[in-house]
Image (tube, rainbow, N blue to C red):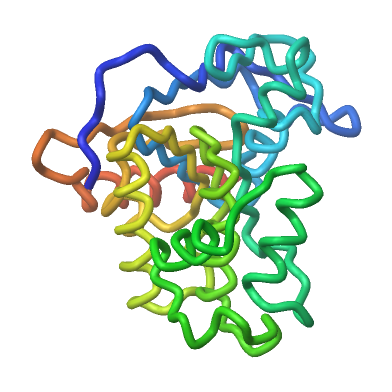
Amino acid sequence: MANKIQNSYVIEVDSLCVEINQTSVLKSLSFSVARGEIYALLGGNGAGKSTTLKTILGFHVPSSGKLKIDGQDVYSELDTVRQKTAYLPENATLYPHLSAIENIEYFLSLAEIAKSNEEIEGALTRVALQSAAWRRPLDSYSKGMRQKTAIALALLRSAPIFLLDEPTSGLDPVAIDEFNQLVSELAGSGASILMVTHDVYGACQVANRIGLLRNGELVGEFEAEQPEKIDTQAVHAAFAQVQTRVTAK
């Protein structure tokens, strides 16, 4: 697991309120992510996890509160902020008839980013995608292989901030371990990572801090005591209690 780096916060969410179709989805949400830190926002369905990421990306406009990325206001500096962030949705949107290399070349060209074949192959090697698959169409890939391709693309964009939406959903245990190792390496190199998930165990395995989200509100935080990981039993108990309260409403 990556060591937490005591530094200025790269993601700052302060009293954020978001309404969608006149329904309050995020309610005075506040948390922060430091440089080199992995922060997991943990919650069940409807807790507001994906809405948080989409608001950071500028797709939802908050009714109140502040949101800064690397010291810049998201809504006055949106283009600059998006250049600094790599977003990995639960199901990465890639072209199934193209290979990993062809997908990467295409999306880099849209972003007007020039990378050599050696750099592209280096990124695919870094994410542990087997070289035999690099030139095969993605319709033959497992979900884990597609995730690796999307992460390689993010690496080539040199984005210092990663936003991950349910990144291990549907992956087998080996692929989850590989993904967690890669995320830890990214954080160790100075990247700031915000992941949203409902996977208690996975969050405890990889995160430096966990924020527990319920109905758009942060109701608790857990922090790893180095070199130990976050206490899975404590988080699971709190998560189960939160889910019981949500179900009872």
At 78% from the left and 72% from the top, the residue drawn is 95
Left or right, residue 164 beside residue 17: left
Quadrant of the rendering where the C terminus is positioned: top right
At 25% from the left and 32% from the top, the residue drawn is 223
Quadrant in the rendering for residue 86: top right
Say which of 59 and 27 sits in front. Answer: 59
* Image position of 118 with respect to 189: above or below: below
At 81% from the left and 49% from the top, the residue drawn is 110
At 74% from the left and 63% from the top, the residue drawn is 93
Query: How far across and how far down the image is residue 112, in percent?
Result: 76, 42
Say which of 86 and 239 sits in front. Answer: 86
Say which of 180 and 148 sits in front. Answer: 148
Query: How far across and how far down the image is residue 116, in percent?
Result: 58, 56
Task: Give the farthest residue toward the left.
Answer: 227
Count of numbered circles in the view:
0
Left or right, residue 34 beside residue 102: left
Task: Give the farthest residue toward the right.
Answer: 21
Query: How far across and how far down the image is residue 53, in percent?
Result: 64, 37
Quadrant in the rendering for residue 113: top right
Query: How far across and how far down the image is residue 167, in percent?
Result: 52, 58
